[in-house]
Amino acid sequence: MLLYQPNNGYCYNSDTHFLYSFIMNNLKKFKNIKGELLDIGSGSGILGLLVSRDNPNLQLNQCEIQKVFQFLTNLNSNNNKITNKLFEGSFLEIEFEKEFDICISNPPFYHNNVIKSENSILNIARYQDSLPIDKFFSKVYKVLNQKGKFFFCYDAKQLNVLLKCLENNKFNVESIQFVHPNENKDASLVMIYARKNSKSLTKILPPLIMFEGSEFSKKVNDIYKMSSTHSIKVDLDEYC
């Protein structure tokens, strides 16, 4: 999958690949994956495109607030011959005309107290003040159907807030996995699968270890191989 990305701006990273793998692993137990998929904060479009590529019976919907990434989402969708419907604007403000079976997102999650970049495009893509957790989960609940699935990743250090907000918004956590830089370091990322109207017990998956020594772990290399993406950096100043 060839994906255009901005020379000067937010680019997808390993988190998106790991979340894609997490989604696919959790969807394996379902025999027929179909219906409406919503990729929230699509950026370059990578997450929704990967999940749609591997589940061709899903109808891909994407929403994005920034014009430069709206352009990239559609460009990458067209170039990879995957049909999408793009909703332009803030996820919190868009009035969707339909419900969704699956919502996926790699949302902005850096804490607001961190020193921010002078690049406004980077800030919107990175910092949670553009998509506060409680408002984010509340809107996801509203747009999902009655058995809708919700997959996302977030800063592992904010797990207590995530679990509280999910419960407050009537989500049940069905599966969770932590990502560690190496086996001796604390988790830096958490990936969560939550569902509406579910009473299932939570499944804690084995941790994903990024590095073994100075090299990627076998699991990480397997994920990159499964993703099979190639980035092309382009100058998109005229779209900013």
Image (cartoon, helix red, strand yellow):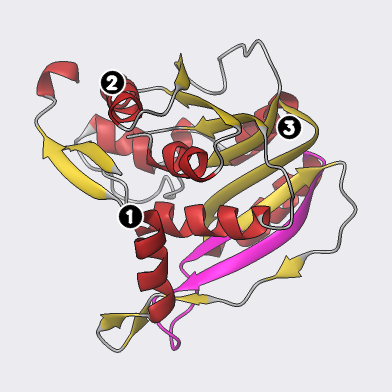
- The boundaries of the magenta stretch are 169-191
Instruction: Name the residue tied to disc 2.
Output: 71
Q: Which is nearer the eye, 18 or 36? A: 36
The question of residue 182 being in magenta is answered with yes
Q: Say which amino acid is labelled 3.
A: Tyr
Assess disc 2: are there few (<14), some (14-19) or many (≥20) residues with their C-alpha within 10 Å of its C-alpha: some
Circle 2 SS class: helix
Q: Which is nearer the eye, 69 or 118? A: 69
- Using residue 191 as the reference point, say whether residue 111 is left or right of it: left
Q: Earlier in the sequence, mark 2 or mark 3?
A: 2
Circle 3 SS class: helix
Q: Say which amino acid is labelled 2.
A: Phe
Residue 124's x, y, as percent?
35, 33
Q: Is residue 2 visible?
A: yes
Circle 1 SS class: loop
Q: Which is nearer the eye, 181 or 169? A: 181
State the mark number for residue 141: 3
What residue do we see at 42% from left, 65% from top? Answer: 223
Q: Residue furthest right?
A: 199
Residue 142's x, y, as percent?
74, 25
Q: Looking at the image, is 5 positioned above or below residue 96?
A: below
Q: Is residue 10 visible?
A: no
Residue 172's x, y, as percent?
80, 50
State the mark number for residue 228: 1
Q: Earlier in the sequence, mark 2 or mark 1?
A: 2
Residue 8's x, y, as percent?
14, 37
